[in-house]
Amino acid sequence: MIDREFVIASSEKRPGDDRHQRLSELLKKARRSIRVDAARLGNNQRIPARIGKLVSQEEIAEVIGVSRVWYALLESGRPVQASISLLARICDALMLDQQQRGDVFYYGAPEVCTVIESHIAFWKPRTGGLFSGAL
């Protein structure tokens, strides 16, 4: 089933706005770092025939409920926006730690992080990431 909680964002990039590229790099690195012998992607069992192979974009897309094409756009740094729940499913599927999850939300939903940061003064981005220190 395809998740309808995402939209294609404007193709216009603001000067200095490289958050899509940073999110892209983080997602690719995380997907490629999953061990080939991993039997699960988050809470989801991998197809037995895929165990022993690199985790594909298609596998991640299927687990999170979007098309492979849409996930490929996200991983390529194209300006797409995802809902908070979709970002959470991506984090779960890629089995990200707390720091990486914070970075996914910082790059994937900066408007939400801006609201949060404005209410909690001790959250300071580390070179662009949200959760850099102990909370």
Image (cartoon, grey):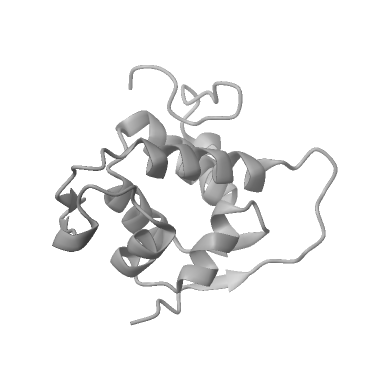
- Picture quarter with the N terminus: bottom left
Residue found farthest to the right = 15
- Indicate the position of residue 59 as horizontal and vertical percent values: 33, 62
Classify residue 100 by image quadrant: top left
Q: Which of 111 and 85 is in front in this view?
A: 85
- Indicate the position of residue 30 as horizontal and vertical percent values: 40, 39
Residue found farthest to the bottom = 1
- Indicate the position of residue 107 as horizontal and vertical percent values: 56, 43
Q: State whether residue 23 is above or below residue 88.
A: above
Count of number-bearing discs:
0
Q: Locate residue 102 relative to residue 73 in the image: left or right.
A: left
Query: Is residue 114 something that shows in the picture?
Result: no
- Indicate the position of residue 93 as horizontal and vertical percent values: 29, 52
- Picture quarter with the C terminus: top left
Query: Is residue 19 something that shows in the picture?
Result: yes
Q: Which of 110 and 75 is in front in this view?
A: 75
Residue found farthest to the top = 133
Q: Locate residue 73 relative to residue 87 in the image: left or right.
A: right
Q: Which of 61 and 109 is in front in this view?
A: 61
For image coordinates 29% across by 65% down, the residue present is: 63
Q: State whether residue 22 is above or below residue 123.
A: below
For image coordinates 45% across by 79% down, the residue present is: 4
Q: State whether residue 87 is above or below residue 126.
A: below
Q: Locate residue 85 relative to residue 122 in the image: left or right.
A: left
Q: State whether residue 99 is above or below residue 71.
A: above
For image coordinates 65% across by 43% down, the residue present is: 21
Q: Nearer the viewer, residue 99 or 47?
A: 47
For image coordinates 46% across by 63% down, the residue present is: 83
